[in-house]
Image (cartoon, rainbow, N blue to C red):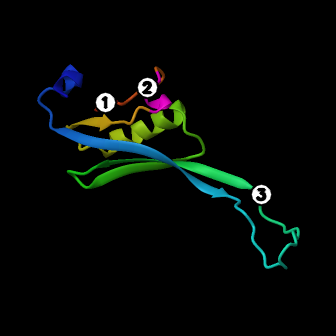
């Protein structure tokens, strides 16, 4: 892990953070109603769907976390989450953020703060 750290992290306490995101929301499911055997009655159901993405990260050693709810999961949302994590890191420390390798985790448009190093 030391090979992945920038020179600016030398001599600083290291915090290990773990990050992931999840889609949360509502989507209509099958509608069930009581009916006579063999009949197929029509029944209205909610066909709308909406969701959001929960970006979360934790530092188990410090028992702290950082999270954002975003309408999309993309590089822009990930950059906002990285800034949030950077603010949650102990001042004077450096964070190593363990990622699962989703497409927006390896984007060249990511701009992590100076106190955060990404580890995919």
- In what element is the residue under mark 3? loop
In the picture provided, is 84 more to the left or to the right than 32?
Answer: left
Instruction: Tell me where residue 12 appears, x and y as whole percent.
Output: 15, 33
Q: In terms of image quadrants, where is residue 39? A: bottom right
Please say if 30 is above or below 15: below
Q: Which sits in the foreground, 86 or 37? A: 37
Q: In terms of image quadrants, where is residue 73? A: top right
Q: Is residue 104 magenta?
A: yes
Label 2: how many residues lie within 10 Å, few (<14), some (14-19) or many (20+)?
Answer: some
- In what element is the residue under mark 1? strand
- In what element is the residue under mark 2? loop
Please say if 18 is above or below 1: below
Where residue 47 is drawn, which disc sits there? 3
Instruction: Tell me where residue 63 appears, x and y as whole percent.
Output: 25, 55
Where residue 119 is drawn, which disc sits there? 1
Q: Which is more N-terminal, label 2 or label 3?
A: 3
Q: Which sits in the foreground, 40 or 119? A: 40
Q: In terms of image quadrants, where is residue 26? A: bottom right
Report the magenta residues as a range.
102-107
Label 3: how many residues lie within 10 Å, few (<14), some (14-19) or many (20+)?
Answer: few
Foreground disc of the pair 1, 3: 3
Name the residue at 46% across, 20% down.
108
Q: Is residue 80 magenta?
A: no
Residue topped by disc 2: 106
């Amino acid at each position: 892990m030391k090979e992945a750290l920038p020179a600016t992290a030398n001599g600083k306490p290291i915090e290990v953070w773990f990050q992931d995101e999840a889609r949360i929301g509502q989507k209509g499911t099958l509608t069930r109603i009581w009916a006579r055997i063999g009949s197929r009655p029509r029944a209205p159901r909610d066909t709308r769907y909406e969701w959001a993405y929960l970006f979360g990260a934790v530092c188990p050693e410090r028992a702290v976390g950082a999270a954002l709810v975003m309408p999309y999961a993309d590089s822009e949302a990930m950059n906002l989450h990285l800034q949030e994590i950077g603010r949650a890191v102990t001042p004077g420390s450096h964070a190593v953020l363990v990622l699962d390798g989703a497409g927006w985790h390896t984007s060249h448009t990511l701009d992590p703060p100076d106190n955060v190093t990404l580890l995919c």
